[in-house]
Image (cartoon, rainbow, N blue to C red):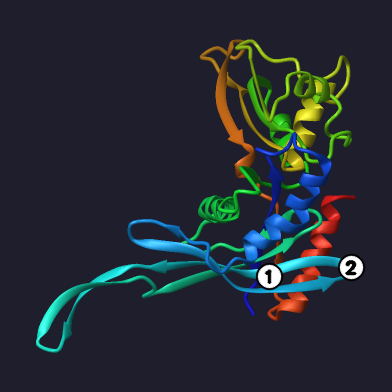
Amino acid sequence: MRQKKYYLAKVSISENIFSSMENRYNIINEYIPNAILNKESVIEYDKYNFRITDTQVYTYSGEKYIAGNLTRSTKMTATILEGNQTREKTFEDVKAVPVDFFYNIKNEVVAYRTCTEIDSEKFIDNFRQIIEIDHRVGDIKLIPYTSVNSIRDFFKELDVVTEINFNLIKPNNPGSKEYYDFERIINDNNLRALDINMSNANGIKYKKENSDEFTDSIESGISLTESAYGTVEVRGYIETEIPGKRKNRKKKKKKYKSATSAKFPRFFKTRENDKISILGKVNEEIKRLFL
């Protein structure tokens, strides 16, 4: 049986992040789940619609989940005959294309699949829009997790890092280990998001003196990104030696490389087919996120 591939993304409150703790609790545990379960919510485009279908609520290993499909249905206009008269009629649901997902309510994590018609970007955008239809939720962020150490490994590929751009959001759980280095900046200025753009053509200092460890600020930014509380873009180059015409003369060539955190999505694969078995795998992978 062919393996199924599931990506992982984090839902975070944005618009109401500074509301009372009670309201945030209600958003996480009541309003967002209700928005996912609302069968009437539809995102309409010119040629197709998106809605959440086939939903079921499960409790697995003490954790509450919503399983369902994000479904794209095609619109089609056709000429039909009614009696001895013809007229144009639009059919809203000619072809349905579903991709399945599992949403962990407590941890606000969604595991989802993709297909040709619904790639990761389309899933995230439409899943987010459907949840935001409930005005009590307000704007939210839906950010993919990155694979473990993938961003750090990209840094290590470069001889010189010339640009680092972080886009970070305020975590739902202030005081977490990933949060300490930016807590004062975000809280003092009442920020929902923080953009940090670093550049130096001669090279950014991102490691501690005489150490392979990242500086505290870079480490915090990477940790927040790995925890799906932000994204990062990194640019730099690799120096390669080019032999000169004389053996004792060599030139250095710069090979530029860039990457964003979106290039390193976190995912898992499973051959399981029934919902409960897949849910067990999802639950296992989500637990790993919070070790």
Residue sitting nearer the eye, 225 or 73: 73
Quadrant of the image occupied by residue 170: top right
Residue sitting nearer the eye, 161 or 275: 275
Q: Earlier in the sequence, mark 1 or mark 2?
A: 2
Q: Please name the residue shown 73% across and 72% down the image.
A: 57
Quadrant containing the N terminus in the rendered view: bottom right
Callout 2 secondary element:
loop
Residue sitting nearer the eye, 176 or 234: 176
Q: Would residue 85 be found to the left or right of residue 34 on screen?
A: left
State whether residue 112 appears in this view. no
Relative to 106, does residue 72 appear above or below in the rendering? below
Q: Please name the residue shown 75% across and 15% down the image.
A: 205
Q: Please name the residue shown 49% across and 60% down the image.
A: 118
Dot 2 amino acid type = Gly
Q: Name the residue that disc number 1 marks.
A: 67
Q: Which mark is residue 62?
A: 2
State whether residue 280 appears in this view. yes
Relative to 89, does residue 223 appear above or below in the rendering? above
Quadrant of the image occupied by residue 67: bottom right
